[in-house]
Image: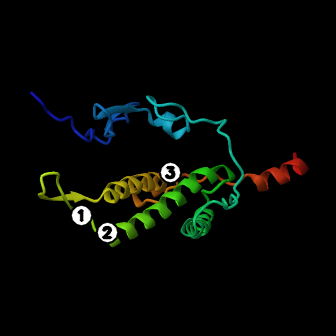
Amino acid sequence: MFFLKPFLTVRPPSCAKPRNEMIFLGSKNGWETTDPDRAEAGQGESRKRPINKKEPLPAKRIPSTPAHLTDEGQVAWGRLTALLDRMGVLTEADGFALERLCDCYSEILALRELVDANGRIYETTSTQGELVIKANPAVAILADADRRFKSYLVEFGLAPATRSKVQIKADDDQEDQFAEFFG
């Protein structure tokens, strides 16, 4: 028989908080244990990998615009670099991913024009001489480009649902400049 575990553990206020609680995380089995002390100490979750303290930190810099981008891609590059720089998430290492994002955007614009001009369906004649209605292949290509575009938006935190998951690291350049003078 299938039954659900409770979402919250109800305890009287006098009881001490247990070290590990069962919480719903939407995982494979639906339930995982979390060690609050480890999470607060920045060591990651008890069942997940610890936080990488030696993660490479590329310089926060706007990458140069690739010359091969289309006109639409170059406009998108300018708008996105300004936006991502204001958000504080753009680094010199993001050039290739941003290039793909701009390529996908210009491809989407071209495919939309093609679909608008030719329609979502077209009529053709079969080998028996009957009228056959088929889907325009540009519609499927457009759907694929939209999926790729969305995945790149997610990577940069530009989709509403993923914006809250993006973490901005503090800029330590100021501290490093003074560290050499003050120890």
Q: Is residue 29 above or below residue 128?
A: above
Q: Is residue 164 visible?
A: no
Kindly identify the amino acid type of the residue bearing the numbered disc 2.
Asn
Q: Nearer the viewer, mark 3 or mark 1?
A: 1
Location of the N terminus by quadrant is top left
Q: x, y (%) of residue 21? A: 35, 33
Q: Find numbered disc 1 in the image and state the secondary structure of the residue it sits on.
A: strand
Location of the C terminus by quadrant is top right
Given contact means CB atoms under 8 Å apart, are the residues at marks 2 and 1 in contact? yes
User: Could you tell me which residue is drawn at 32 percent across and 59 percent down?
Assistant: 139
Given contact means CB atoms under 8 Å apart, are the residues at marks 3 and 1 in contact? no
Q: CA distance from mark 3 to mark 1?
A: 36 Å
Q: x, y (%) of residue 131? A: 13, 60
Q: CA distance from mark 3 to mark 2?
A: 33 Å
Within 10 Å of the Cα at label 1, are there few (<14), some (14-19), or many (20+) other Cα atoms? few
Residue topped by disc 2: 118
Kindly identify the amino acid type of the residue bearing the numbered disc 1.
Tyr
Q: Find numbered disc 3 in the image and state the secondary structure of the residue it sits on.
A: helix
Given contact means CB atoms under 8 Å apart, are the residues at marks 3 and 2 in contact? no
Q: x, y (%) of residue 164? A: 46, 56
Position of residue 161 in the picture relative to residue 5 (left or right): right
On residue 122, the disc is 1
Which residue is at the front of the view, 157 or 1?
A: 157
Residue topped by disc 3: 155
